[in-house]
Image: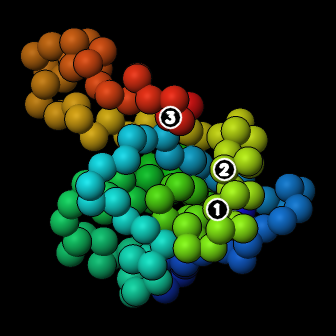
């Protein structure tokens, strides 16, 4: 398991791949549905700083920003987002991650749900309807 964290220099970094479960620090995890602008492992390799996320536009970057900020507010230094914490070019890593995901969600201290298809301005008008219509509720891998 590879986790993200914001280093003291402001850079977004990964932990080393943690194999032993007792070595995994407390972390938050993101539950979401995939879209067209997802941030992947290679995208984060070239990111110099968490602050650089603000310069990036798109739904995928919004998810990473949301998760980093919310984890910090909740006192968690580490967080996990499937789109960018798994090197999908490595078939062995991808297979291990898929087989471990249930446990990773189960063991997270916090699980954040990102509803990319629910606009914040709809919450004031008819938030319940907007939530019920979110595609997140119809996806098998969300929680």
* Alpha carbon separation for disc pair 1 and 3: 17 Å
**Coloring scheme used:** rainbow
Where residue 89 sits, quadrant-wise, is bottom right
Which corner quadrant holds the C terminus? top right
1 or 3: tag closer to the N-terminus: 1
**Front-lying residue, 44 or 55:** 44
The residue positioned 55% from the left and 67% from the top of the image is 88
- Against 129, is 85 above or below? below
Q: Which residue is mark 2?
A: 98
Residue 8 rendering spot, x and y as whole percentages: 54, 81
Tag 3, which secondary structure? loop
Q: Is residue 112 visible?
A: no
- Against 115, is 95 above or below? below
The answer to whether the residues at label 2 and label 3 have Cβ atoms under 8 Å apart is no
Q: Residues within 10 Å of mark 1 (few under 14, many from 20)?
A: some
Residue 87 rendering spot, x and y as whole percentages: 57, 71
């Amino acid at each position: 398991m590879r986790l993200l964290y914001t280093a003291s220099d402001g850079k977004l970094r990964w932990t080393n791949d943690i194999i032993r479960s007792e070595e995994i620090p407390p972390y938050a995890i993101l539950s979401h549905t995939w879209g067209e602008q997802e941030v992947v492992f290679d995208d984060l390799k070239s990111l110099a700083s968490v602050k650089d996320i603000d310069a990036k536009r798109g739904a995928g970057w919004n998810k990473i920003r949301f998760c980093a900020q919310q984890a910090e507010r909740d006192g968690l230094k580490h967080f996990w987002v499937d789109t960018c914490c798994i090197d999908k070019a490595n078939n062995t890593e991808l297979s291990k991650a898929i087989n471990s995901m249930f446990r990773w969600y189960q063991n997270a201290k916090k699980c954040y749900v990102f509803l990319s298809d629910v606009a914040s301005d709809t919450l004031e008008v008819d938030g319940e309807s907007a939530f019920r219509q979110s595609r997140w509720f119809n996806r098998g891998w969300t929680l």
